[in-house]
Image (cartoon, coloured by chain):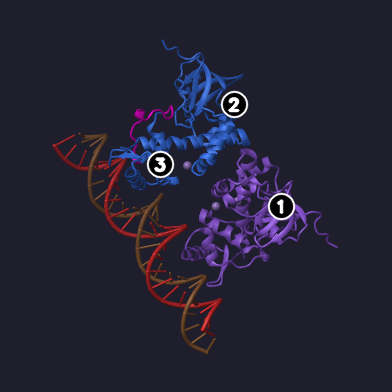
Chain colours: A blue, B purple, C brown, D red
Amino acid sequence: MHKLTNRTPLSEAQEDYLKQVLLLGSGGEGPGRLEDTHPVSTQSLADQMQVKPASVTGMLKKLAALGLVEYEAYRGVRLTEAGYRVALEVLRHHRLIEAYLHEALGYGWEEVHAEAEKLEHHISEAFEERIAEWLGHPSHDPHGDAIPSATLELPPTTPNRRLSALEHGVRGLVARVATQDQDSLNLLAHLGLKPGAALQLLEQVAEGSRIQVGKERYLLPMSLAQVLWVHLEGGPHDG
Amino acid sequence: MHKLTNRTPLSEAQEDYLKQVLLLGSGGEGPGRLEDTHPVSTQSLADQMQVKPASVTGMLKKLAALGLVEYEAYRGVRLTEAGYRVALEVLRHHRLIEAYLHEALGYGWEEVHAEAEKLEHHISEAFEERIAEWLGHPSHDPHGDAIPSATLELPPTTPNRRLSALEHGVRGLVARVATQDQDSLNLLAHLGLKPGAALQLLEQVAEGSRIQVGKERYLLPMSLAQVLWVHLEGGPHDG
DNA sequence: TTTTATTTTTAGGCAAGACTAAATCTTTGT
DNA sequence: ACAAAGATTTAGTCTTGCCTAAAAATAAAA
Ligand SMILES: [Mn+2]
Ligand SMILES: [Mn+2]
Ligand SMILES: [Mn+2]
Ligand SMILES: [Mn+2]
């Protein structure tokens, strides 16, 4: 038997931990169903949250006591149903805010993340509702990340692949840019490599991926090629 | 010798205390120059912040140590120049956010305050800048309160008077609605009594002010008449 | 001018969330 | 199988911002 309503509001820190447990526990394709999630280590959480491992342990115990995570000492954490819902809610806030800052206030694609990171914890449900409405209930944010719906459903996932894993000759559209590094985002923005952009993979070499974007050709270093997710032209036929 | 830059960012609580010291230390006409301000008691701050007096004392000591207030035990506080600037900055955030929520996101006039109260501490200067731009750098928020400029100048004050203090027969425009009580705001909104609305004072009676608004006549109870600030028709001629 | 009431401050605590240093698991390499 | 290395947890502190109860100062009344 679960408690279906969350009595006390969670702190900013608690919300951020839950969000990171979801993100780190999901594959690189971004969050999916709770079942497809794997346990997350104390260390990875510590790195992500910019905090020492001992602090993580402390917080995990509290979240476990609240029934938001399943935590087994030395064995990592995973979200409970309740924790999963909180994480998705925070993710929805984050991504809606990013989309809104970009579309309504002209924020650069690469500068939305930091602002969203703070605001996600401080907006009301009314605010969430109104910006979602203004945006027309988008399914993806400016980086191509999926936005959970108001009822916390995830949009259907398209079968994308990392640029670094494509075979030569393949064409497709940038679907997602999976980094939060300001300068990487800025670099990619300057090359026109944002969600929706068309590209072709010319060849894979040791240093990275040689690609064609419009009339330009670039050798995109491995570290960047790995964060670019591509939606293949035509896409795979199922059946 | 002052420190001109604030090294560490202030906490939400600290910012709110400074804002309230400014508000409580200014007359009912709203904040003006620092010199026109009077010292604020521990008790009034405690009431306003919904906190016990002992907590106020503790915070005031910290703010004094930071050079943001002048605090003399048993004698009340006032802002220093530095504290005054912080307070105005927070006020600017608050009022710009209220205006933006109202104009851009269709928030009701009476529901903007609560959201602004939280967000004021969590937006970046970039955000402030962009919503100010979007709004066209307004000088007043939806309640008629003055918005400090980006350089923290206050707009020129118009000589308004409380409805409860007018002589009968006088006509004017609602300039400011100086309450944060949700239900009072809601009531006034339903009567069309928001900034810009024209009204005439018919007579003052013990229970309050009898007024005419368009074709309607109301007997506005004292408590409400006191929060309605009116800009007199024609206004006073100086000279 | 005393006494009484009100306001304010001090003293001592508590919960969050972080840290360091020291213990304790787990995993790895031989 | 076993020791060394690496990861994680425990123990003990710190800061922030709040609280209660008791002491002290100020203001009001007699
Ligand atoms: Mn982001
Ligand atoms: Mn965050
Ligand atoms: Mn307000
Ligand atoms: Mn506030």
Q: Is residue B93 left or right of residue A172?
A: right
Measured as percent of width and height from the top left, residue A38 is found at: 34, 31
Q: Quadrant of the N terminus of chain A?
A: top left
Q: Position of residue A41 (x, y in %)?
A: 34, 38
Query: Is residue A36 a member of the stretch shown in magenta?
Result: yes
| Residue at figure coordinates x 50%, y 20% from the top left | A231
Q: Residue B154, located in which quarter of the rendered image?
A: bottom right
Which residue shows up at 51% across the image and 34% down it?
Answer: A95
From this view, report whether residue B11 is shown above or below residue A72.
below
User: What's the mark number on residue A40?
Assistant: none
Q: Is residue A155 magenta?
A: no
Q: Residue at 86% across / 63% down in the picture?
A: B239
Please tell me which of labels 2 and 3 falls first in the chain.
3
How packed is label 1: few (under 14 Cα within 10 Å), some, or many (20 or more)?
many
Q: Main secondary structure of the magenta part?
A: loop
Which amino acid does the dot numbered 1 rest on? Ala
Is the CB of the residue bearing disc 2 within 8 angstroms of ligand 1?
Answer: no
Element at label 3: helix
Q: Amino acid at mark 2?
A: Gly
Is circle 2 on the same chain as circle 1?
no
Query: Which quadrant: the C terminus of chain A?
Result: top left
Residue B30 in sight here: no
Residue A108 sits above or below residue B57 on the image? above
Range covered by the magenta-colored residues: A28-42
Amino acid type of disc 3?
Tyr
Tell me the residue that label 3 is attached to.
A17
Identify the chain of the residue marked 3, using the numbered disc in the image. A
Q: Secondary structure at mark 1?
A: strand
Q: Which residue is mark 2?
A: A192
Inter-mark Cα distance, 3 to 1: 46 Å
